[in-house]
Amino acid sequence: MAHASDEDYARILVTSALPYANGPAHLGHLAGAYLPGDIYCRFQRLMGRDVVYICGSDEHGVAIIMRAREEGVSPQEIVDRYHPMLRDGFEAFGMSFDHYGRTSSPKHHEMSQAFFAEIAAKNKFVLKKESQLYDPEAKLFLADRFVRGKCPNTSCGYEEAYGDQCEKCGRSMSPKELIDPRSAITDAKPELKETTHWYLPLDEVQGWLEQWLDGHGEWKPNVLGQAKSWLKEGLRERSMTRDLPWGVPVPSAVAEAAGVDAEGKVLYVWFDAPIGYISSTCEWAEAVGEPDRWRDYWGQEDTKLVHFIGKDNIVFHCLIFPAMLKLHGDFVLPDNVPANEFLNIEGKKLSTSRGWAVWLHEFLEEFPADYLRYSLLGVLPETKDSDFSWKDFQSRVNNELADTFGNFVNRSLTFAKRFFDGKVPELVAPNELDKGMLQAIAEAPAAIAEHLENYRFRDAGDAMMGIARHANKYFNDSEPWATRKSDAQKCANTIHVSLQVSAALSIVCEPFLPFTAAAMREMLALDGVRSSTRSEGAGGLGWHDAARPLMTSGSPLGEPVILFQKVEDERVQAQIDKLEAAAAPPEPRGGPYEPLSDTIVYDDFAKLDLRVALVTEAERVPKSKKLLRCQVDLGFEKRQVLAGVAEHLSPEDLIGKKVVMVANLAPRKMMGLESQGMLLMATEREGRLLPVWTEGEPGSTVA
């Protein structure tokens, strides 16, 4: 079956996987779903095509709830912390999203509930009452990642498999299939408790999914292989709702019609998350003042929909979301899902829990974004897992960006400034070497475009750098430093051609190196290039214009600047040391332990009256660096206690906590205030003070 080309579509809608808002972005994220998507969209805009690029934070699901429970805060506090961190990090990296939304927004809740209600109205869901795992201690149904246990796959047997998927062998499952399941919240043994949920009948649409995938033989083998392996195993009904305290609530009207109590029931995160693509497109349309325009991208058959994801999301984007779209009936289906494999770090599997990761925001504090974009471009895991190493990063920056690309551009502009009054010299009677270089740039845009349109980003990047390699050789072979004195016109021809190559590079490098491209065009005084960050139609200089000479003889040039600085060994070693330190097991803190005090007899200890005290108020004592003034409740009376812990603890660390205090200590005045007791503190080896917590009743004795 012949597949349509990009020219056959009126518009292109591109999405990158929604990152969980429970932590910052790392290099694995960028190499999987984000850098390839941005390169593709920047290229398509330079081609003059109508492109909308959508992403946003995935703010629901078990991962968010678990992070919130670990920190003792609300899920909303977690997503409000990480959403701006993700958004701002992507912007600094050069991601050209038309809109970056969030799934906690009112618009997303509205559209997700409407989508769910439409499928329910068409009677496509299967309503099932069944027993599910329940944590009696947390008083919570254990959906998916709230459960851990042994993988039921006999060839795997991984002891820490989650209730939805084994991270070791990739098997999908339900929580009840785990062997020896336990709660990921309390580690309690779950009970079975009855509940009702809405299931998506994937088994009923399997035939359609098989036929649909058979029509996409042009997809990457790793994507088709994983999707078809699921089909071969046979699809089953999958629950699209959960009993959870955080998420998009099940529409009350749908629940009422089904005779189900909707209290505490939310949409499955993998039902609402991909709808985030739709709700974010709707928010984009509202932002540009055309609120109905989103329908053109989601409801017209001449729209090309492309999902950029990592391989862990293949099943959801190639089977479950297409099934949802099909059952709803009003939306376009994906034209392609060019998923990437995983990126390893320094030869080891990336693991955020073990500290083996390189974080985007920390990287950008040390190096320019284009250094990272180019180094990742060379190791994109397009067909198999690949590896990022700091030494390889250094080599790519120093040898390719600095010595090849930057060196050529700098020499060309510096020669023009020094010997041709900072203007483009005239080309007269070019020789074969000149013509060969001009022919190379005439052919390059189409060659690079073919790679990009077929999602071969590494090949495209290599072809782009190939122009710079060819240009460097051309410059060296032409020897303008020699012909400047022996044949001035030949020298002028060399610089003219080199500036034409630089102009071409400033366009074809933009999808990969957008910040570099902007700096180059400023040096070249090249205006009127079509934006690659937003769609503007066919106006201005675009991708294919890079194939022809763009610099006019006699045109003044800007000031040349160094595009790339080499990365020194010391800076690379510092990053390697930082990575290894983050992943190393914790060293014993502090120095030697304090020696034991002199031996006492029981009668000495018995003189202390230790009581449980509830701290009801705490505040810093003015003009004191060390003191906190605390109001404590002993159950039978309230007291004021001054604690010398302000350099170690904030008032909020103590308020509402039950601590141990010496209740029969003689009162003492400090800073004009009376202290009526002493709070017990543990002093760690490095000198940090920590309260002695207790669960006892206020006023109870400690013996």
Image (tube, rainbow, N blue to C red):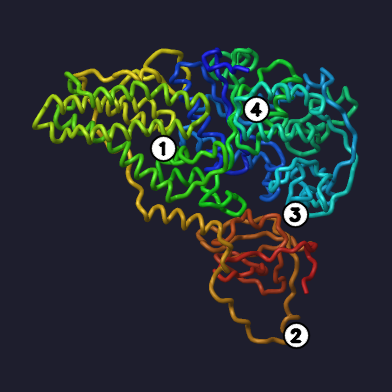
Measuring from the top left, give residue 50's x and y in whole percent: 51, 16
Q: Residue at x 47, y 35 (%)?
A: 458
**Disc 3 or 2, which lies upstream in sequence?**
3
Residue tagged by mark 2?
Answer: 603
The vertical placement of 36 against 334, above or below, is below
Q: Is residue 204 above or below residue 700?
A: above
Q: Earlier in the sequence, mark 3 or mark 4?
A: 3
Where residue 373 sits, quadrant-wise, is: top left
Q: Which residue is mark 1?
A: 370
User: Would you call the spot at circle 4 few (<14 residues within 10 Å), some (14-19), or many (20 or more)?
Assistant: many
Separation of disc 3 and disc 2 at Cα? 51 Å
Residue found 81% across the figure and 28% down from its top: 203
Q: Earlier in the sequence, mark 3 or mark 1?
A: 3
The secondary element bearing badge 1 is classed as helix
Q: Is residue 416 left or right of residue 648?
A: left
What amino acid type is highlighted by mark number 2? Asp
For label 4, the residue is 276
Mark 2–mark 1 distance (CA, rounded to whole Å): 72 Å
Q: Secondary structure at mark 4?
A: helix
